[in-house]
Image: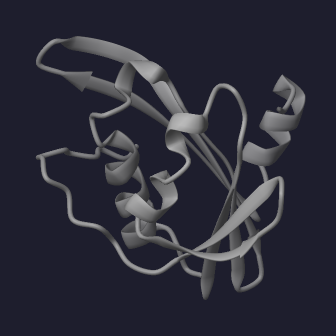
Amino acid sequence: RYSKNELEDLMNSENVDVLTCRVEDRFGDYGLTILMIVLKEGAMWKIDSFLMSCRVLGKQIENAILNWYVANRFDGDVLESYYIASKKNNQLESKYEELGFAEVGRSLEIVIYHFESIKQLGSSIEVNYG
Protein backbone atom coordinates (compact mmCIF):
# COMPACT_ATOMS: atom_id res chain seq x y z
CA ARG A 1 0.00 0.00 0.00
CA TYR A 2 1.07 3.54 -0.70
CA SER A 3 0.73 6.68 1.40
CA LYS A 4 -0.93 9.78 -0.04
CA ASN A 5 2.48 11.40 -0.57
CA GLU A 6 3.84 8.29 -2.29
CA LEU A 7 0.81 8.20 -4.62
CA GLU A 8 1.33 11.87 -5.47
CA ASP A 9 4.99 11.15 -6.29
CA LEU A 10 3.94 8.21 -8.50
CA MET A 11 1.34 10.35 -10.28
CA ASN A 12 4.02 12.97 -11.04
CA SER A 13 6.52 10.45 -12.40
CA GLU A 14 6.99 9.99 -16.15
CA ASN A 15 7.87 6.35 -15.45
CA VAL A 16 4.54 5.49 -13.84
CA ASP A 17 0.94 5.42 -15.04
CA VAL A 18 -1.68 5.83 -12.31
CA LEU A 19 -5.21 5.21 -13.50
CA THR A 20 -8.40 5.52 -11.52
CA CYS A 21 -11.83 4.54 -12.71
CA ARG A 22 -15.24 5.92 -11.85
CA VAL A 23 -18.05 3.55 -12.81
CA GLU A 24 -21.62 4.44 -13.71
CA ASP A 25 -24.35 2.27 -15.17
CA ARG A 26 -28.11 2.39 -15.55
CA PHE A 27 -28.47 1.60 -11.84
CA GLY A 28 -26.37 4.50 -10.63
CA ASP A 29 -22.93 5.86 -9.87
CA TYR A 30 -20.56 3.44 -8.10
CA GLY A 31 -17.96 6.14 -7.61
CA LEU A 32 -14.21 5.62 -7.76
CA THR A 33 -13.82 1.86 -8.00
CA ILE A 34 -10.48 0.98 -9.62
CA LEU A 35 -6.87 1.96 -9.11
CA MET A 36 -4.19 0.66 -11.47
CA ILE A 37 -0.51 1.55 -11.08
CA VAL A 38 1.90 0.59 -13.88
CA LEU A 39 5.66 0.98 -13.42
CA LYS A 40 7.52 1.59 -16.68
CA GLU A 41 10.99 0.05 -16.51
CA GLY A 42 12.30 0.46 -20.06
CA ALA A 43 10.67 -2.15 -22.29
CA MET A 44 9.27 -3.99 -19.23
CA TRP A 45 6.09 -2.45 -17.84
CA LYS A 46 4.77 -3.91 -14.59
CA ILE A 47 1.29 -3.66 -13.15
CA ASP A 48 2.26 -2.91 -9.57
CA SER A 49 -1.30 -2.53 -8.27
CA PHE A 50 -4.68 -3.37 -9.75
CA LEU A 51 -7.23 -2.70 -7.02
CA MET A 52 -10.96 -2.93 -7.56
CA SER A 53 -14.02 -2.41 -5.41
CA CYS A 54 -16.19 -5.47 -4.86
CA ARG A 55 -19.16 -3.28 -5.94
CA VAL A 56 -18.16 -3.70 -9.59
CA LEU A 57 -16.84 -7.28 -9.59
CA GLY A 58 -18.49 -9.31 -12.33
CA LYS A 59 -19.29 -6.27 -14.49
CA GLN A 60 -16.16 -6.73 -16.69
CA ILE A 61 -14.93 -3.25 -15.80
CA GLU A 62 -11.42 -4.60 -15.20
CA ASN A 63 -11.48 -6.13 -18.71
CA ALA A 64 -12.51 -2.81 -20.26
CA ILE A 65 -9.87 -0.83 -18.35
CA LEU A 66 -7.07 -3.24 -19.22
CA ASN A 67 -8.12 -3.42 -22.88
CA TRP A 68 -8.24 0.39 -23.03
CA TYR A 69 -4.83 0.66 -21.35
CA VAL A 70 -3.17 -1.80 -23.73
CA ALA A 71 -4.72 -0.15 -26.80
CA ASN A 72 -4.08 3.47 -25.75
CA ARG A 73 -1.19 3.74 -23.29
CA PHE A 74 1.00 0.63 -23.29
CA ASP A 75 4.15 1.17 -25.30
CA GLY A 76 6.56 -1.42 -23.90
CA ASP A 77 7.58 -4.87 -25.06
CA VAL A 78 6.29 -6.79 -22.03
CA LEU A 79 3.39 -6.02 -19.69
CA GLU A 80 3.88 -8.03 -16.52
CA SER A 81 1.63 -8.54 -13.55
CA TYR A 82 1.50 -10.78 -10.55
CA TYR A 83 -0.97 -12.36 -8.18
CA ILE A 84 -0.32 -12.78 -4.47
CA ALA A 85 -3.04 -14.75 -2.71
CA SER A 86 -4.73 -13.23 0.32
CA LYS A 87 -7.97 -13.75 2.22
CA LYS A 88 -9.52 -10.81 0.36
CA ASN A 89 -8.60 -11.70 -3.23
CA ASN A 90 -8.81 -15.49 -3.64
CA GLN A 91 -11.85 -15.13 -5.95
CA LEU A 92 -9.51 -13.37 -8.39
CA GLU A 93 -6.92 -16.14 -8.61
CA SER A 94 -7.60 -16.85 -12.30
CA LYS A 95 -8.53 -13.27 -13.27
CA TYR A 96 -5.26 -12.47 -15.08
CA GLU A 97 -5.70 -15.45 -17.40
CA GLU A 98 -9.25 -14.23 -18.13
CA LEU A 99 -7.76 -10.81 -18.96
CA GLY A 100 -5.37 -12.20 -21.59
CA PHE A 101 -2.26 -12.90 -19.49
CA ALA A 102 -0.25 -16.12 -19.51
CA GLU A 103 1.53 -17.53 -16.47
CA VAL A 104 5.33 -17.32 -16.81
CA GLY A 105 6.46 -18.13 -13.28
CA ARG A 106 5.24 -19.36 -9.91
CA SER A 107 6.47 -19.76 -6.36
CA LEU A 108 4.67 -20.52 -3.10
CA GLU A 109 3.62 -16.87 -2.65
CA ILE A 110 3.37 -15.36 -6.12
CA VAL A 111 2.25 -16.10 -9.68
CA ILE A 112 3.83 -13.96 -12.43
CA TYR A 113 1.99 -13.24 -15.68
CA HIS A 114 2.83 -11.62 -19.03
CA PHE A 115 0.15 -10.08 -21.21
CA GLU A 116 -0.53 -11.94 -24.48
CA SER A 117 -3.71 -10.62 -26.10
CA ILE A 118 -6.83 -8.57 -25.55
CA LYS A 119 -9.87 -10.64 -24.62
CA GLN A 120 -13.09 -9.55 -26.25
CA LEU A 121 -15.84 -8.39 -23.93
CA GLY A 122 -19.25 -10.00 -23.83
CA SER A 123 -20.88 -6.68 -22.96
CA SER A 124 -20.86 -3.07 -24.06
CA ILE A 125 -18.62 -0.91 -21.90
CA GLU A 126 -17.50 2.58 -22.83
CA VAL A 127 -14.24 4.00 -21.45
CA ASN A 128 -13.93 7.78 -21.32
CA TYR A 129 -10.42 9.11 -20.65
CA GLY A 130 -9.79 12.57 -19.38
Residue 43 occupies which quadrant of the picture? bottom right
Point out residue 29 in the picture as x, y percentages from the top left corner: 29, 14
Q: Is residue 94 left or right of residue 105?
A: left
* Viewer-nearest residue: 105 or 16: 105
Q: Residue at x 79, y 35 (%)?
A: 8
Give the color scheme: rainbow, by chain, secondary structure or one colour. Answer: one colour
Residue 96 in the image: above or below residue 43:
above
Q: Is residue 81 left or right of residue 109?
A: left
Q: Residue at x 46, y 22 (%)?
A: 54
Point out residue 36 in the picture as x, y percentages from the top left corner: 59, 45
Point out residue 21 in the picture as x, y percentages from the top left corner: 44, 34
Residue 74 in the image: above or below residue 64:
below
The quadrant of the rendering that contains the C terminus is top left
In the current view of this chain or complex, which residue is farthest to the front? 108
Q: Residue at x 78, y 57 (%)?
A: 110
The quadrant of the rendering that contains the N terminus is top right
* Viewer-nearest residue: 99 or 44: 99
In the current view of this chain or complex, which residue is farthest to the top? 28
Q: Is residue 100 left or right of residue 12?
A: left
- The total of numbered circles placed on residues is 0
* Viewer-nearest residue: 74 or 106: 106
Residue 79 in the image: above or below residue 7:
below
